[in-house]
Image (cartoon, rainbow, N blue to C red):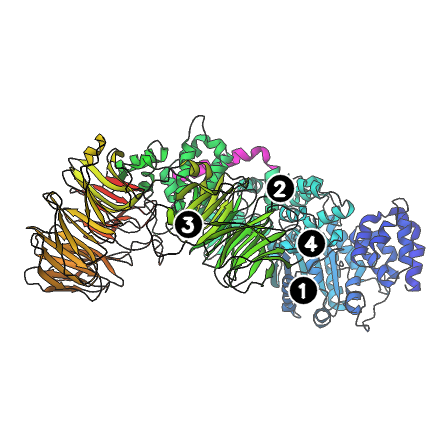
Amino acid sequence: MDVRSRNYLLMNRQALEKDIKTSYIMDRMISDEVLTLQEEERNTQKERAAMLINIILTKDNNSYRSFYNALLHEGYSDLAALLQDGIPAVSSGNRKSSMDGMTSYVKTVLCEGGVPQRPVVFVTRPELVDAIKQKLCCLGSDPGWVTVYGMAGCGKTVLTAEALRDHHLLEGYFPGGVHWVSVGKQDKAGLLIKLQNLCSRLEHDSTLSQRPPLNIEEAKDRLRLLMLRKYHRSLLILDDIWDSWVLKAFDNQCQVLITSRDRSVTDAVAGNKYEVHVESGLAHEKGLEILSLFVNMKISELPEQANCLVRECKGSPLVISLIGALLRDFPSRWEYYLKQLQNKQFKRIRKSSSYDYEALDEAMSISVEQLNDNYKDYYKDLSVLPKDVKVPTKVLCILWDMETEEVEDILQEFVNKSLLFCDRNGKSFHYYLHDLQLDFLTEKNRNQLQELHKNIVNQYKKYYKLNTPVPSQEDCMYWYNFLAYHMAGANMQKELRDLMFSLDWIKAKTELVGPAHLIHEYVEYSSILDQKGSTVRENFQEFLSLNGHLLGRQPFPDIIQLGLCQPETSEVYQQAKLHAQRETGTFYLEWINKTSLKNLYRLVVRPHRDAVYHGCFSKDRQRIASCGADKTLQVFKAESGERLLEISAHDDEILCCAFSADGEFVATCSADKKVKIWNSRTGQCKCVYEEHSEQVNCCQFNNRSGPYLLATCSNDTFIKIWDLNKKYCRNTMMGHENSVNHCRFSPDDEYVASCSTDGTVKLWGVRSANELKSIEIKDFFRNADEQPDDVDVLVKCCSWSRNGDMILVVAKNKLLLWNIKSLSKVAYCRGHMSWVHCVTFSPDGSLFLTSSDDQTIRIWETKKVCKSSDAVLKSELDVVFHNDEVMILAIYNQKHLQLINGNTDSVVTQTAAQESPISCCCLSEDLKFAAFGQESGTIKVLHPKLILKRRTPFLSWEAYKTSVQHCQFTSDYQTLISSAHDSVIQVWNWQLDECVFLRGHKEAVKDFRLLENSKLLSWSFDGTVKVWNITTGNTEKDFACHGGTVLSCAVSPDGSKFSSTSADKTAKIWSFQSSSVLHELKGHEACVRCCTFSHNNKLLATGDDKGEIRIWDMLTGALVHFCSPVTVDEGEPTHGGWVTDLSFSPDSKMLVSSGGYLKWWNVNTGESLQTFYTNGTNLKSIHVSPNFKVYVTVDNLGILYVLQKM
C-alpha cells in the first residue's frame, strides 16, 4: 500500500473504529476479492472494526480503494471523505492482473469509479452481459441512456457491473472513466446528498476545494461542467432508479446507464435511448451452481432438498443467493429454509448480504407501495391469477368492466415498474406475474382471496350470461382452463357443480384442450364436487377417463353419442339422453344391450402419435412414463393423463422405459442399440450405454432404492445387469435361444424374469446369473380354445405382482395372469384393439397398465380383471329381426352356440360344448332351425328351442376336410348351403340327407348369395363369379370378373344386375341378362372389400381397405360422392381402416358402414351423420333391420352391440 494511503488510514483510525459496523463493509470487500472468508471469520464482533483496519494495513492499494468504495455504498460518506485524499493514483500501464484475468487498468478504473465487484458467489449469464455491452457501444460518443430493467432481485446490478469488466469497452468507448452512483428511492434531500457526494468524488484531486452545492439545480450544473471539462467521454451509472424526476438532475448531455424496475423511467429525459430487459429467472442448473458455490460442495453432492429449493426460488438470483448465504452460515438448515419458502414465510428469509432491503417481502412490497391507491386495488385483483399463465387483456377487461385501452394503460404502469410482465404475441397482449410476485400477493391478501375469486367469477357470468366463450375470442382458453379454479377458490359449490357436470361444458372444453385437464379438475376439486351418497363426480370422471383416447383426436366425436354408451344409472347417460331427445334432426343411437358390459379400465390415454411400446408407473403411482415408435419419451400424470415431459430421446424407435425406485431417473432403450438414463423431471440425459450388439428390447431398474441396478435384454439373446454407479456390466445371462423381449426384477430383487420369442419365460438368480426355472408359454396357445393361425406365439412382456406370487404375461393382444408356484393361469382378458407390447403392475398391485399398437395406454383394476369372466363371442354371427324382436345366433367361447334376445340382452338357449371349435352359424327366419359349421369340416343342424328340453337333436354332415366358412338356409329351411376353404359349394338337404356338389371354381370360394328360383350366386379367389342352379348343380352363367380375388358381390333390388369388387382395386356392375360388364368403377386406392345397392335401384356404394367409401350412379357409372375415410386424425387409421360392410336405408337417403367402428352417412351430401365407437375394432359385418332402426355387430373383443336409433 502507498505510504500516503497508509498514513490516511492510521490518521483516521479512531473515527473509523468508533462509527462503522463492519458486516456489510466486509461483504463488499470480500466481493472485491481483497478480503477472504477466513479473514472475516477471524474477527469477533467486539473487535471487528479494529481488526478490519489492521488487515487493510497489511494489504495493497486495491484494499484501500475497496474500503473507500464500501464506505460510500454503505452510507458512510463522511468517513469516506476523510480517506478521499489518500486514494492511491491509477496507472494504466499494467495490463494483466494475476487475480482474475482482468487488466489492472480495468480494475483500477472500476475501483475508482465505485463499481461494485463481483459477489462472493457469481455465475455467468453471458447473453445478458453481451446485450448490455452492445447497447453501451451503441451510445458511441453521443449523449444518451441505456436502461437495464427487470423485477426486484433479477440481477440487474451484478450484470451491469460485469459488463463494465471489459478493457476494450472502457478504453475504446469510455476513456474518461466510469462513475457509479447507487441512487435508490430518494426524496429531494436524499437526492441532493447523492449529488453532493458525486461532485465531491469527481473533484477529489482538484487543487481548488469547492464548497458542496446547496441545491439540486446547482449540483446539476456543477456535474454538467465536471462531465464536460474533466470527464469527457465517461460513463455515469445510476443504479436502482425509481422516479423519472430523479433523472432530470443527471440530464446533462452525458452518457448514462441506469438500472431500474421501471422501464418507462427515461420517458422524462431527452437523448438516444436503449433498453436491456433482464429476465426474471435463472436456469435450474445455474441455481444449483450458486448454491453449490455458497456451501462449497459439488453439485452432485448437494442434498435432495437443493433441487426443491431452486424450484421454490423460481429462478430468482436474489432469492437463491439469500438462501445460499444463509446456508453458508447454517449448513444444517436445508429443510427449514425449504419449508419457509413453501409456506411463503418471506419475512424469515432475512438479509444476509448487502442487498438494500431487510427481508425478501420488503423488497417486493416497496414496489407496490409506489402505486397510487386505485392502482393498488387493481394490482390486488391479480392475486388470484394462476401461476405460470399468460392472461389475455380481454380477461382483465371483463374483470374490471373496462375498455381494452383503459386496461392496457393500467397494466402498462405495472409492466413499467416490473410488477408485471407483458408478452406481445402479434396484435394481442398477454400478461403474467413472476411466481415470487404472485406468492407475495397471495400471502399479503390471503384473507381476501375468496372474495377476489368470487368477483372474477361474477364478472364472467355478467359478461357471458348463459353463453360460453368461443375459440375465436382471445380470452376463450383462459376461461376453459381456469373458470373451475376460480369457482373452487371462491368456494362456489353450486356453480362449480353446474359447470363440471355439464356435457355442454365438457364438450366445449375437451374439443379445445382434450380430457386430461378436466380429469385433473375432478380429482383436484372432488371435496367440493362430491355430495353425500352421490356418485355424479365419479360418473363424469370415469366417462372422461375411459373415453379420453377418443376425445383427444380429430374429427371430434359426438360427446352425446359417447354419453349414451354409459350405464343407464350414470348422470352422464341421463344428460346425454336429455340432449338427444331435445336435438331434432340429429341422429343418435341407444346401445340397448350394454348392461352386460363391465369396464375393467381406470383410464385410457393416447399420448403418442404411433404405436406405444412401453409404459410404467413411478413408485408413488403419481406419474407414468411411456415410449414408442415416434421416438419420444413421455411422462404424464397417472390420474388424468396430463403431460409433464416430452423428450425426443433416440434416433430410432424406443422399445422400453423404466422409472428408478426413487423416481429420480427414467431409463430408455431403443432399436438404435443404445440405453439412456434421463432425469425424470428435467429431461436431462445422465448417461448412455452402448454394449448390446443388436436392438435393446427392454430395460428395468431394481425395486429398492440405494445402488441403482439396471437389467437390459436384447435381440442378441443376452440379459445384462448394470451397476449405474460403477458404469459397467455386472452380469450377462445366457440361455434363451432367440431374441429376449423383456426382463423384470422380482419384488425382492433376488431374481430376474425374462421372456423370449423362443416361447419361454425364464427365471434367473441376480447374484449367480444362473437359470432357475423355465415356463413354456406357447403350450398354452396350443391347448387354448383358440382358432389356430400362422403367427408364432411371441411372449412380449411380463410383470411381477407385489407379493411375487404371480406374473402377468402378454402375448398377441391377450393378457395372461399366472401363479408362479403352481404354474397355473389365474385370469385372462382382452381390451386392446391391436398387439399389446407391455404390461406393468403399479407398486401396490391394485392397478396395471398396458400399451399397444393401437396407440393407447390402458390402466386396469387388478381385482376386476381377476373376477371378470373371460367369455367372448366370435365375430361370425347371424341375426333375425322377427316381430320387433332381435334374435342373435352367436358363437360363444369357440365351442358353444348361443341364441340371444338382443332386446333384453338375455341368453335364450346355449348348446353344450362341441368337440371342435365352431367357425360359422346361421338361423332360419322363423327361428325354428339353426345350423353351424366347425373347424373340423362338420356341419350340424338343430332346433334351438329343443335344447331347453335337454335333448340333442343334432343332424350332422361330415362335409369338408377344412374349416367351414359360411352356411345359409334356403327359403324353405329344408336345405343348407355351405362353403369351406376349398372350391366346392355343398347344397345339403338335411331332411332327406341328400347333397348336391357345385364344382367349377378353381380356387377357394370367398362367399355366396341365394337368388330367386333356386339360383345361387358365388364368387371366388380365382376372380370369377358363377350363377348356379342348386337343384341340378349346374353352372348357368360364368363371369370372369377380375384379375384378382373377388372380395364381395351384391345384387340389385330388381334382380337384373350384380356388382363385384376385387383386390385389384376396382368394382364392376354386370348385367345378368347379357352377361356383360356395364360399368368398370375405378378410383379406389386399395382392395375394394364390400358393396351394396340402394333400394331405389339408382346407386351403388363401395368400400375399400383404405377406409374410403364411394357412391356411384348405377346408370352412368359416374362417381356421385366420395365419403371421407373411416379414420381418425389425418393419416392415422387407428382402428384398422378397412370398410367391411355397407347397407342403405329403405329410402336410400342414408348409408351405414362398418370397419374400425360404425358410421352413418348422408347419401345426398356424402357427409358423416354419426359415428359409434365400439370398444374393440375389426367389425366384420353389420346386420340392419328392415326399417333401418336396429343395428347388430360384434367387435374383435367379442363384445356384442345391439344399437337402436333414437
What amino acid type is highlighted by mark number 3? Answer: Asp
Residue ID for mark 3: 779
How far, Cα to Cα, is label 1 from label 3? 93 Å
**Is residue 201 depicted above or below 304 in this figure?**
below
How far, Cα to Cα, is label 4 from label 3? 51 Å
Residue 475 visible in the picture: no
Who comes first in sequence, dot 1 or dot 2?
1
Compared across the picture, whether 751 is left or right of 99 comes to left
Q: Are marks 4 and 3 in contact (CB under 8 Å)?
A: no
Residue ID for mark 2: 440
In the rendered image, residue 763, in percent from the top left (x then y), is placed at 54, 49
| Magenta-colored span | 444-469
In the rendered image, residue 819, in percent from the top left (x then y), is placed at 49, 41
Residue ID for mark 4: 300
Who comes first in sequence, dot 3 or dot 2?
2
Compared across the picture, whether 697 is left or right of 1084 comes to right
Who comes first in sequence, dot 4 or dot 3?
4
Mark 1 against mark 3, which lies toward the viewer?
A: 3
* Helix, strand or loop under label 4: helix
